[in-house]
């Protein structure tokens, strides 16, 4: 199976996207009986294969070569069907060779709308028909306030009508949307091709359906000749039971909700633990903040003491320098005293030597004798 990219429909899908795409091809079957058909943006190829069951010939064209290779390998056995690589602004088809062109959910994927219309007119026969669908930008994007990343240029109602009227003389525009309904049909095999449609409320029920309000998609049938108006239609998937699907979805949602609750409780527990850890960290932070403040005060006091000690040191250094200077002066004076003392010592020694010399001389001895004689006379 071709992988679903998120935008291009593939047959294994179910639900809304399936009904929307198959319904468009279903209404086209009434226009292609025995005719030559071009399916622009044929994708996986299922739609072209459906048209080939009624048409004389069908050509599916897509810009994606991988999709064309896939379509050729899966639908290549259908004799009146072929697939070509090409774009909507350069269709590889000869002029005036196609009776019906179908192009579903293509125009919003590019901004070459004029070129696309010119190419479609080129390949269509003079009485050819174009069946085209386009999302209603107002309902599809504006109102839900969301953008489809695969879409390049969506159109409003007025823009689509103006574009198509410039290239075709006749146009019928229809709306398409999913809606809730109640079905009442035979439980036995039936070939009924028409159904009655009812609408209304508790005050009145009528056998008619008013114009479709706020369609999600526009479906246009265009030609230069008169176009037959198809009956209002709906697509019913007999294999799908809405109630069962909703019940199954409800059961799945309940399981998912249970899982989500379990995950929520787990996350709540983690949150509480984180909150507890945060409170613990906050307490620790506050304690550290207080300790930091205390240390800051101690640091400031120590800095003050250091500054005071530095001041005292500078003062002591000054006193030391003064004492050192005084000591140096005293040392100098001491040296001078020692020098003087040494001089006196030398003189004293010299005097002693002189006295000793004198005492040992004859004069000194006579003087001593004289002094004794003098003493006797007295």
Image (cartoon, rainbow, N blue to C red):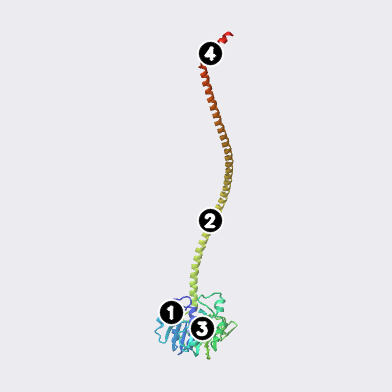
**Mark 4 falls on what kind of element?**
helix
- Residue 81 appears anywhere in the view: yes
- In x, y percent, where is residue 35? 46, 89
Vertical arrangement, residue 118 with respect to residue 6, above or below: below
Between circles 2 and 1, the one closer to the viewer is 1
Q: Which residue is mark 4?
A: 366
Q: Foreground residue, 373 or 328? A: 373
At x 55% / y 11%, what residue is drawn? 370
Q: Quadrant of the C terminus?
A: top right
Crowdedness of circle 3 by 10 Å Cα count: few (<14), some, many (20+)?
few
Q: Which residue is mark 3?
A: 115
Find the distance from the CA under tag 3 to the CA under tag 4: 166 Å
Residue 281, labelled with which disc? 2
Q: Are marks 3 and 4 in contact (CB under 8 Å)?
A: no
Q: Distance of mark 2 from mark 3, alpha carbons? A: 67 Å
The answer to the question of whether label 3 and label 1 lie on touching residues, with beta carbons closer than 8 A, is no
**Crowding near the residue tagged with mark 1, few <14, some 14–19, many ≥20 C-alpha atoms within 10 Å:** some
Q: Secondary structure at mark 1?
A: helix
Q: Which element type, helix, strand or loop, lies under badge 3?
A: helix
Label 1 or label 4, whichever comes before in sequence order: 1
Q: How far apart are the two marked residues, 2 and 1, measured between alpha carbons?
A: 61 Å
Q: Position of residue 201 (x, y in %)?
A: 58, 82
Dot in front, 3 or 4:
4
**Gap between marks 1 and 4 measured at Cα:** 161 Å
User: How far is disc 3 from disc 1 in space, using C-alphas?
Assistant: 21 Å
């Amino acid at each position: 199976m071709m992988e679903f990219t998120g935008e291009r429909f593939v047959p294994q899908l179910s639900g809304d996207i399936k009904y929307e795409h198959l319904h468009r091809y279903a209404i086209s079957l009434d226009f292609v009986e025995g005719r030559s058909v071009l399916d622009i943006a044929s994708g996986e190829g299922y739609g072209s294969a459906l048209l080939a069951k009624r048409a004389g010939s069908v050509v599916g064209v897509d810009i994606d070569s991988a999709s064309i290779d896939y379509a050729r390998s899966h639908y290549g056995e259908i004799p009146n069907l072929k697939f070509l690589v090409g774009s909507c602004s350069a269709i590889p088809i000869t002029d005036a060779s196609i009776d019906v062109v179908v192009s579903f959910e293509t125009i919003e994927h590019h901004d070459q709308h004029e070129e696309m219309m010119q190419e479609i007119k080129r390949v269509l026969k003079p009485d050819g028909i174009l069946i085209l669908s386009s999302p209603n930008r107002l309902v599809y994007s504006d109102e839900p306030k969301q953008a489809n990343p695969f879409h390049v240029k969506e159109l409003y109602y007025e823009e689509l009508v103006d574009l198509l009227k410039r290239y075709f003389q006749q146009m019928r525009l229809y709306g398409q949307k999913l809606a809730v309904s109640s079905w009442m049909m035979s439980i036995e095999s039936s070939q009924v091709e028409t159904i009655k449609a009812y609408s209304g409320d508790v005050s009145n029920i009528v056998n008619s359906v008013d114009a479709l309000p706020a369609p999600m998609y526009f479906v246009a049938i265009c030609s230069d000749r008169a176009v037959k108006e198809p009956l209002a239609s709906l697509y019913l998937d007999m294999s799908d039971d809405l109630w069962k699907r909703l019940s199954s979805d409800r059961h799945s949602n309940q399981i998912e909700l249970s899982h989500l609750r379990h995950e929520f409780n787990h996350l709540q527990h983690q949150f509480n633990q984180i909150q507890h850890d945060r409170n613990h960290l906050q307490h620790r932070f506050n304690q550290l903040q207080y300790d930091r403040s205390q240390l800051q005060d101690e640091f400031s006091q120590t800095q003050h003491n250091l500054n005071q000690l530095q001041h005292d040191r500078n003062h002591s250094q000054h006193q030391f320098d003064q004492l050192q200077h005084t000591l140096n002066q005293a040392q100098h004076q001491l040296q001078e005293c020692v020098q003087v003392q040494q001089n006196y010592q030398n003189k004293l020694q010299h005097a002693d030597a002189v006295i000793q010399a004198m005492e040992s001389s004859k004069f000194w001895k006579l003087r001593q004798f004289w002094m004794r004689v003098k003493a006797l006379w007295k």
